[in-house]
């Protein structure tokens, strides 16, 4: 029988992001926390989870600023693609951060939050 | 288990090619078959690696190649693993010879992409990422490796000049390779002054988009000996995987799939990293080569940048890296790249590498990965005297 938590999980992830949250799974067996789109526990390979909406706030691990953007992002003046660590749970996610023009605008460790999920630009972040 | 050998190798020039993808593929195939002293009737299976055949209006490539070689009855298999397609495909060919299913097979990698232009190529490449988290959020491939570069530079206090030294060294090697895409001497200043593509990576930190094809003939040792032709032996093979999205890695300054593949290959070969005489590694961006040579065990983590600056990876250094010019200078026709590295090893060990020959080399390693290292393969070769 299909696990209802696995059905449309990307849509659920997107719905959470619209509320500035990141949807994660917490393994019922070993408490490992992963992004919700991963269907088996990365540590114990279990498949029983609680889905949790986690506050989408964290700190920048690394980033780049594109001069040559891929298709669909040509309309943006200057943006960063950012990998960040969510507060407290040490889980990483990544997203699109507009209005970053130069590396000094975003020191490593800068505070950011998930703002929304945009159909065109994906997970949109905001610098705090 | 059969010993697996390489009996022949062939390659087109890498660069912007006018011929169709099938013509490019056939050129390399015929070169490899004839360099082995064989005819197509000796080929029992065809392994083909390709990623963007659709851009030149051809998918289901393997039977088309087999048919045009006049051996349409021979089974073919087309394999795609992004930029690692060639080595991943080679591994399957290797496994089938080793298991005794075939005596002799063709392993061919091919790509034709330059006609799509830089913008479309950049977009197509972004489909090789974990698109939901990366390409879909605005990350290009230079952007992904730029993020890896920034993480590495932050952790190990490396800088943009360290990256530039990789490009300078590989361009110097590529000058000696008549089939290299970008044969141009560059300086550290040239790299640092080139336009930023995705900070901190600049134009000369990035390999080019290339067309090209490379092919090798794999066979068992009995077949190789009977041929009377020179051959080399494949003594180690490893495959590894990494989280497809960079965000999923515990340490962004390493590529887990490389470490796993290398460990397997060294164990199969019964050697350690310090017994390798030279290596062809996946330098799609300068930062990749720095991380590769650490993950492959040639240098401790965080130490490669200094070693590269001091010449340890030059052709006369402690461990020559990318004597062919690497992806950076030789070029990166992504379906062919992994096989092109093996062609370089064959040419090095069979006296065909000219001025770029690594003297007295007897053990060589190839390392190739797909995307940001999500699928990696390492192979180790031994010269047979």
Image (tube, coloured by chain):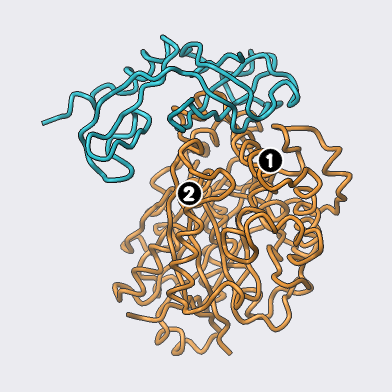
Tint of chain B: orange
Q: Is residue B381 left or right of residue B308?
A: left
| Element under disc 2 | loop
Q: Nearer the viewer, residue A67 or B147?
A: B147
Looking at the rendered image, the disc whose residue lies closer to the viewer, 1 or 2, is 1
Q: Position of residue B79 (x, y in %)?
A: 41, 51
Residue A75 figure quarter: top right
B107 relative position to A108: left or right: left
The correct choice, above or below, for B267 with respect to B330 in the image is below
Residue B28, percent across and down? 56, 62
- Secondary element at image label 1: helix
The CA span between labels 1 and 2 is 35 Å
Please state the horizontal and vertical placement of residue B21, each as a whole percent of the image: 54, 47
From this view, report whether residue B345 is shown above or below residue A40.
Answer: below
Please state if B111 lies on the left or on the right of A88 as rendered: right
Residue indicated by mark 2: B50
- Above or below, B6 relative to A3: below
Residue at the image position 46 percent from the left and 84 percent from the top: B224
- Quarter containing the N terminus of chain B: bottom left
Q: Residue B328 has which mark?
A: none
Position of B92 with respect to B304 (left or right) is left
Q: Chain of mark 1?
A: B
* Residue count near mark 1 (Cα–Cα under 10 Å), binned few <14, some 14–19, many ≥20: some
**Residue projecting furthest to the top:** A19
Count every numbered label the image shows and give the total: 2
Decide which of tag 1 and tag 2 comes sooner along the chain.
2
Quarter where residue B193 is shown: top right
Q: Colour of chain A?
A: cyan
């Amino acid at each position: 029988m299909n696990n209802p938590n696995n059905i449309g999980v990307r849509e659920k992830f997107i719905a959470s992001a619209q509320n500035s949250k990141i949807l994660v799974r917490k393994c019922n067996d070993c408490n490992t926390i992963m992004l919700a789109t991963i269907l088996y526990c990365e540590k114990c390979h279990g498949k029983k989870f609680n889905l949790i909406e986690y506050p989408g706030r964290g700190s920048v691990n690394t980033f780049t600023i594109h001069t040559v953007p891929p298709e669909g992002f040509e309309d943006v003046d200057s943006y960063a693609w950012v990998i960040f660590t969510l507060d407290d749970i040490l889980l990483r996610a990544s997203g699109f951060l507009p209005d970053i023009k130069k590396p000094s605008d975003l020191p490593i460790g800068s505070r950011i939050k998930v703002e929304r999920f945009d159909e065109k630009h994906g997970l949109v972040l905001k610098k705090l | 288990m059969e010993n697996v050998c390489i009996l022949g190798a062939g390659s087109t020039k890498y660069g912007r090619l006018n011929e169709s993808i099938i013509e490019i593929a056939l050129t390399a195939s015929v070169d490899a078959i004839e360099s082995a002293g064989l005819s197509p009737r000796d080929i029992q299976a065809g392994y083909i690696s390709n990623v963007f055949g659709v851009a030149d209006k051809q998918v289901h490539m393997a039977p088309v190649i087999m048919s045009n070689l006049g051996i349409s009855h021979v089974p073919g298999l087309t394999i795609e693993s992004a930029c690692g397609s060639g080595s991943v495909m080679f591994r399957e060919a290797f496994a089938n010879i080793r298991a005794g299913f075939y005596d002799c097979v063709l392993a061919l990698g091919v790509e034709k992409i330059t006609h799509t232009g830089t913008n479309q190529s950049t977009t197509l490449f972004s489909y090789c990422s974990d698109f939901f988290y990366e390409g879909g959020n605005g990350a290009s491939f230079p952007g992904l490796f730029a993020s890896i570069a920034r993480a590495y530079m932050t952790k190990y206090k490396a800088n943009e000049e360290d990256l530039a030294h990789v490009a300078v060294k590989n361009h110097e090697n590529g000058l000696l390779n008549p089939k290299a895409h970008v044969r141009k001497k560059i300086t550290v200043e040239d790299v640092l002054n080139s336009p930023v593509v995705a900070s901190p990576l600049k134009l000369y930190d990035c390999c080019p988009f290339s067309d090209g094809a490379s092919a090798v003939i794999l066979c068992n040792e009995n077949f190789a000996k009977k041929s009377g032709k020179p051959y080399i032996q494949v003594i180690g093979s490893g495959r590894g995987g990494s989280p497809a999205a960079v965000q999923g890695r515990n340490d962004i300054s390493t590529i887990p799939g490389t470490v796993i593949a290398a460990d397997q290959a060294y164990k199969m070969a019964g050697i350690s990293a310090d017994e390798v005489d030279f290596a062809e590694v996946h330098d799609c961006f300068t930062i990749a080569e720095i991380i590769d040579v650490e993950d492959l065990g040639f240098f401790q983590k965080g130490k490669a940048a200094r070693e590269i600056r001091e010449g340890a990876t030059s052709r006369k250094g402690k461990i020559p890296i990318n004597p062919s010019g690497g992806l950076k200078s030789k070029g990166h026709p992504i379906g062919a790249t992994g096989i092109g590295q093996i062609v370089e090893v064959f040419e090095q060990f069979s006296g065909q590498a000219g001025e770029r020959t690594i003297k007295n080399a007897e053990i060589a390693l190839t390392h190739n990965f797909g995307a940001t290292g999500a699928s990696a393969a390492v192979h180790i070769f031994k010269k047979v005297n």
